[in-house]
Image (cartoon, grey):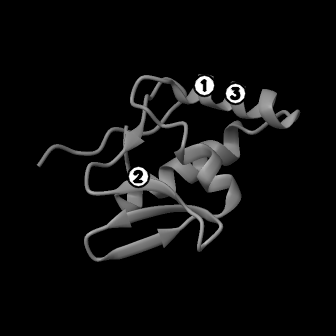
Amino acid sequence: MKPAQTMDLQSCPRVARLFRLQWEPAQESWVLLYPEGMVKLNDSAGEIMKRLDGTTSVATLIAQLEATFGTKNLAQDVLAFLTLAQGQGWVNA
């Protein structure tokens, strides 16, 4: 088995194939659906996950989030979440 690539600013992550990301009106949040169940994402996680297309770099993703929400210094938090999500198998780098 090939080891997972480390998540960094140049990574272009995507939602893992086992999962489907969708807005769930009943939950009023983004969720990850998979054969055995569902993961309800908080608002921040949903904002990150919905931008993962496999072609956008983490650096670009962070810039988009900072522009959208009028804030700065999100890199550490976004990388921490993506590393956690990768460890859970939700995303591939």
- 37 sits left or right of 48 in the view: left
Q: Quadrant of residue 41?
A: bottom right
Compared to 10, does 52 lie above or below?
below
Q: Which residue lies most toward the bottom here?
A: 36
Count all numbered tags in the image, as a single digit.
Answer: 3
Which disc is residue 59 wearing? 1
Mark 3 lies on residue:
64
Say which residue appears at 51% left-offset and 24% top-offset.
57
Compared to 54, does 48 lie above or below?
below
Identified by mark 1, the residue type is Ala
User: Of the residues under marks 1 and 3, which one precedes in the sequence?
Assistant: 1
Say which residue appears at 64% left-offset and 46% top-offset.
47
Identified by mark 2, the residue type is Gln
Element carrying mark 2: helix
User: Of the residues under marks 2 and 3, which one precedes in the sequence?
Assistant: 3
Q: Quadrant of residue 64?
A: top right
Element carrying mark 3: helix
Say which residue appears at 60% left-offset and 73% top-offset.
27
Q: Which residue lies most toward the left here?
A: 1
Location of residue 21 in the rendering, given as x and y in whole percent from the top left corner = 44, 53
Identified by mark 3, the residue type is Gln
Location of residue 30 in the rendering, given as x and y in whole percent from the top left corner = 57, 59
Location of residue 52 in the rendering, given as x and y in whole percent from the top left corner = 48, 37
Q: Quadrant of residue 55?
A: top left
Say which residue appears at 80% left-offset and 27% top-offset.
67
Which disc is residue 86 wearing? 2
Q: Quadrant of the C terminus?
A: top left
